[in-house]
Amino acid sequence: MIIQWILFICFTVFSVYVRLYFFLRATNYYSDKSLNLKRIYAIIYYIFTLSYCVYMFFVVFDNLDVFGGDFLFTFISWLLIMNFTMNVFFVISLTQKY
């Protein structure tokens, strides 16, 4: 269980780095071949992170008390929902050409 949470935290931190990299990059990066490869790798990474996030939903709901009013459960649920939503948005934004 601890290894799963360490992986989840590492994925979340790296996701923030990748988001900042692409949002702070110039907008005309569709002609850049190396950056297109980075976009493809980022899409693959975010699809993997989305599947891991879905897996963590089941881990959280199996191991934590839903009705206990636990602050940790509330924080983890919020973190999972926000991470899932941001990853879906970012995969969609990486696949579209403006």
Image: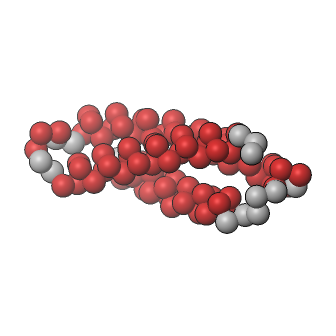
Q: Which residue is drawn at 39% across and 40% down?
A: 56
Task: Locate residue 10, reporting x and y percent.
Answer: 50, 58
Task: Locate residue 24, reporting x and y percent.
Answer: 67, 66
Q: 21 or 72: which is nearer to us?
A: 21
Q: In this view, does 86 lie to the left or right of 64?
A: right
Q: What kind of colouring is applied to the model shown?
A: secondary structure
Task: Say above or below: 34 vs 56.
Answer: below
Task: Say above or below: 24 vs 95.
Answer: below
Q: Is residue 35 left or right of residue 12?
A: right
Q: 60 or 82: which is nearer to us?
A: 82
Quadrant of image for the C terminus: top right
Task: Locate residue 31, reporting x and y percent.
Answer: 89, 52
Q: Which residue is drawn at 17% across and 39% down?
A: 66
Q: Which residue is drawn at 49% across and 55% down?
A: 12
**What is the number of callouts on the image?**
0
Res. 63 visible in picture: yes
Q: In this view, does 59 lie to the left or right of 90?
A: left
